[in-house]
Amino acid sequence: MELDYKAIGKRIKIQRIQREMTQEKLAELTGLSNPHISNVETGSTQVSLKSLIAIANALEITPDVLLCSLFCEKTSFV
């Protein structure tokens, strides 16, 4: 299974905008650079697990919100 970094970036951007947060503020909260946040949101770079967790924490969500598509949310893994 391969990660779709463009989709993850899009979910990050959506969550950030819903919170009326700038890329600059997200960068400040995560300790990442503003250009890196931009590259993550556009899928230009592969976000590391450490950075993904930092972003999720800054957005006050769990990492699965950023990793899973609507399909994941509707699928039971029991």
Image: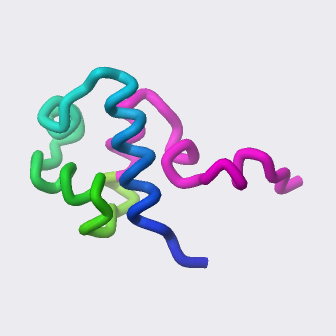
**Within the image, what quadrant is residue 59 found in?**
top left
As displayed, is residue 46 above or below residue 40? below
Most common secondary structure along the magenta stretch? helix
The residue nearer to you, when weighing 37 against 55, is 37
Q: Check if residue 34 falls in the magenta segment.
A: no
**Quadrant where the N terminus lies?**
bottom right
Residue 62 visible to the viewer: yes
Name the residue located 43 percent from the left edge and 27 percent from the top edge.
Answer: 60
18, above or below 33, in the image: above
Instruction: Determine the residue located farthest toward the bottom in the rendered image.
Output: 1
Is 66 a magenta residue?
yes
Q: Is residue 24 left or right of residue 17?
A: left
Q: Is residue 45 above or below residue 59?
A: below
Residue 43: name its quadrant: bottom left
| Lateral position of residue 30 relative to residue 57, left or right | left
Whether residue 58 appears in this view of the structure is: no
Is residue 68 positioned above or below 24 on the image?
A: below
What's drawn in magenta, residue-wise?
Answer: 52-78
> At 50% across and 70% down in the image, what residue appears?
3
**Which residue ends up furthest to the top in the rendered image?**
20
Query: How many numbered badges does the structure rendering display?
Result: 0
Name the residue located 26 percent from the left edge and 68 percent from the top edge: 45
- The residue located at (17%, 40%) in the rendering is 27
